[in-house]
Structures are given as C-alpha cells and as structure tokens.
Amino acid sequence: MVVSTFESHPAAESGHRIELAPNCSLTPQTARRFMGGLAFVTFGTAGFFALQGLWPILPFAGLEIGLLWWAVRASMRVGQQRELILITDDSVVIERHGFTRPSRTVFARHWATVKLRDPPAARHPSRLVIESHGRACEVGRFLTEEERIGLAGRLRQLVGKSSESPALEARS
C-alpha cells in the first residue's frame, strides 16, 4: 500500500492521494523464466517416457503446462489492479484500474462515511466500505486484515464522520 499527498492543480485545493496495489512479486520476466524452465523439465521428462513407448504422457504434459500458463497469467492480471483514493476538501474519489474496466466513484466528502464491516462468516475478511446517500464502494479487497484496519483508520481521519469534514493538513 502506498500513501502520498497530492496537488490536483496548482490553483486548486490540496488533498490526499492513497494508492492501493496488491503485493505481486512475480514480474513478467520471472514469469517467463519460471514457465520456460518448468516446460523444459516437463516436456523433457515426457519426451523421455514417450521414447520408452509411453506416448500418452505427452498430451497430459501439454495440458499441465497449459493450465499452469493460464494460472500464472491470471495471477499476473490480478497484480496489475490499482485502486486510487483521492480525498479533497469537497470530495472522495475512488478510481479503479486494471479490473475488467476502469471505474470512478465520487462521493461528497461532507456526507461520506467510512465503515469497516464485520465478515459475513468466520475466516472471511472484513469489508472496508465508503458510502453516502445509499451508494457504497468497497475498497482494499486485496489487502490483509491488518492493512485494511490501518487504512480504515487513516480514511476515517481524512474523511471524518457524516456531516463533518476535518481540515486536510499536509501529511507525508
């Protein structure tokens, strides 16, 4: 999770910018190396057994590598997700990038509330929601429970309670 201060425009009011991103340590280069090494070992072993007369192993080796490629690709796609929370004197803006399509939700800061909802069942994560006037937007789905609790405290500090807008002083 990255937290920083921003200036929207030189003449505009300052605010806070919180960027959320999942922890994804696998880079595209390491993913290619991983898949290449595993494919080399798998097809090498399958080729050895195919030469011994056990040729049906080849389609299963191909299926295994294909499914693994699909899983690594899906993991890489999740790692590209970003949530950007912009808090100004007037509004709370939540922008999502890297999901199926980008989205932007805007709340009036004066009426917005931050709620950390209990999990629906044991061993499920809590839900961090910003809501106002019957609309709600969940943020930080990919955060750990501790990170979500910390973010909830930070957002409550910046957004305030409904009908209350605390002053936004510059914080690092």
Image (cartoon, grey):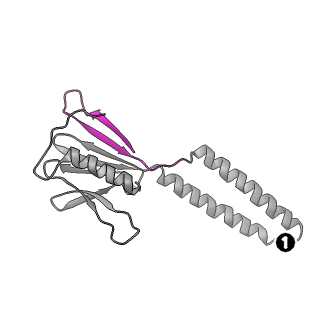
The quadrant where residue 118 appears: bottom left
Q: Quadrant of the N terminus?
A: top left
**Which residue sits furthest right?**
52
Camera-nearest residue between 72 and 159? 159
Secondary element at image label 1: loop
Q: Residue furthest left?
A: 163
Q: Residue 85 location, x and y as percent?
A: 30, 46
Residue 104 appears anywhere in the view: no
Q: Quadrant of the C terminus?
A: top left
24 left or right of 152 in image: right
- Where 65 falls versus 159 (above or below)? below
Q: What residue appears at the point 80 percent right and 58 percent down from the top-left corner?
A: 44
Circle 1: is it few (<14), some (14-19), or many (20+) Cα within 10 Å? few
Q: Is residue 161 rendered magenta in the image?
A: no
Estimate the x, y position of residue 103 in percent, counting from the top left: 32, 52
Which residues lie in the magenta part? 1-25
In the image shown, does 15 or 8 lie closer to the viewer?
15
The amino acid pointed to by label 1 is Leu
Q: Position of residue 156 (x, y in %)?
A: 22, 49
Which residue bears the numbered disc 1?
Answer: 54
Residue 10 sits inside the magenta stretch: yes
Q: Residue at x 27, y 46 (%)?
A: 154
Nearer the observer, 31 or 122: 122
Q: Is residue 64 left or right of residue 109?
A: right
Observer able to see residue 48: yes
- Name of the residue lying farthest toward the top: 10
Residue 6 locus on image (x, y percent)? 29, 34
Count of numbered badges drawn on the protein = 1
> At x 66% / y 53%, what residue is drawn?
35
